[in-house]
């Protein structure tokens, strides 16, 4: 299956938002000649800003998912440590963002699809699941009851998925499940956009869909993880390696 460009996928997942921005903005720009003078500049600035932000988000998406080191995954092993014999990957139906099989040591113990409509309420995730089927078979389970045995994994990778759990309590239970499933000294790798300035500049108000760095650190503390390593894969994507305390 040919992988769609990042910008195309982001547009298809969020097309109501993009069309809901572009159509009114173009209408406003077309009406500028007949608007009263005091409103002309404000209308022009608002419409131009909306168009610029939406186009910038697509350009940034193309860079992140098609031109940055992210997808190749060569940066992953260094964040998980050398002693990775058994690992698992967790997603919400989209497993193609980071290539793991060619770079991870050891064997893949499980691929879990934790999509749960009750706690993953964003319409975009539903459209994404329809338009981009997973490339490898995955077992479905709840984010608050992972289908993994206690301390079964040396490493677990959760890429662009945990932020889809919109409920605070459910995120805490998810992190507790991650801790249960990884051995003492094992690591969990969280890969996410952040609710921060670079993502605000790139995605405008859409950055509110992401989670702030302090929330990921709070969740790590809640589940008794230590931050082993933290790295920016791009200015817009954080990789946070969490090590389970004994």
Image (tube, rainbow, N blue to C red):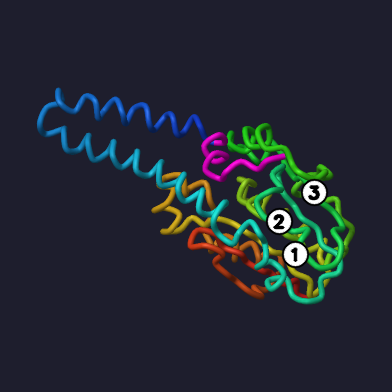
- What is the distance, in whole Å, between disc 3 and disc 2 at their CAs? 15 Å
* 97 displayed left or right of 56: right
Image height of 150 relative to 95, above or below: below
Which sits in the foreground, 96 or 223? 96
Magenta highlight: main SS: helix
Q: Assign a secondary structure to mark 3.
A: strand
Which sits in the foreground, 87 or 11? 11
Looking at the image, can residue 169 be seen?
no
Q: Which residue carries the number 2 mark?
A: 99
Residue 101 placement (x, y as % from top left): 78, 58
Q: Quadrant of the C terminus?
A: bottom right
- What is the distance, in whole Å, between disc 3 and disc 1 at their CAs? 19 Å
Nearer to us: label 3 or label 2: 2
Instruction: Determine the image quadrant of residue 70.
Output: bottom right
Q: Which residue carries the number 3 mark?
A: 112
| Badge 1 vs badge 2, beta-carbon distance below 8 Å | yes
* 100 displayed left or right of 46: right
Residue 173 placement (x, y as % from top left): 72, 54
| Residue under the point 85% across and 54% down | 110
Question: Could you tell which of marks 3 and 2 lies nearer the N-terminus?
Answer: 2
Residue 143 placement (x, y as % from top left): 75, 48
Q: Which residue carries the number 1 mark?
A: 103
Disc on res. 57? none
Residue 52 placement (x, y as % from top left): 34, 43
Nearer to us: label 3 or label 1: 1
Instruction: Determine the image quadrant of residue 75.
Output: bottom right
């Amino acid at each position: 299956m040919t992988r769609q460009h990042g910008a195309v996928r982001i547009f298809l997942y969020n097309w109501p938002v993009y069309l809901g921005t572009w159509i009114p903005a173009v209408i406003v720009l077309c009406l500028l000649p007949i608007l009263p003078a005091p409103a002309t500049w404000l209308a022009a600035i608002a419409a131009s800003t909306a168009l610029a932000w939406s186009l910038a988000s697509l350009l940034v998406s193309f860079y992140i998912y098609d031109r940055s080191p992210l997808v190749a995954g060569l940066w992953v092993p260094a964040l998980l440590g050398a002693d990775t014999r058994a690992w698992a990957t967790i997603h919400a139906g989209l497993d193609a963002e980071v290539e793991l099989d060619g770079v991870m040591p050891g064997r893949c113990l499980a691929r879990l699809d934790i999509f749960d409509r009750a706690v993953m309420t964003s319409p975009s995730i539903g459209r994404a699941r329809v338009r981009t089927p997973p490339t490898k078979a995955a077992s479905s389970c709840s984010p608050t009851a992972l289908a993994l045995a206690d301390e079964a994994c040396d490493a677990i990778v959760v890429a662009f998925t945990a932020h889809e759990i919109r409920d605070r309590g459910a995120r805490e239970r998810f992190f507790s499940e991650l801790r249960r499933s990884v051995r003492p000294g094992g690591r969990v790798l969280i890969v996410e956009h952040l609710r921060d300035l670079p993502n605000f500049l790139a995605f405008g108000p859409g950055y509110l869909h992401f989670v702030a760095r302090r929330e990921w650190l709070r969740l790590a503390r809640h589940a008794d993880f230590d931050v082993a390593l933290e790295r920016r894969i791009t200015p817009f994507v954080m990789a946070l390696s969490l090590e389970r305390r004994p």
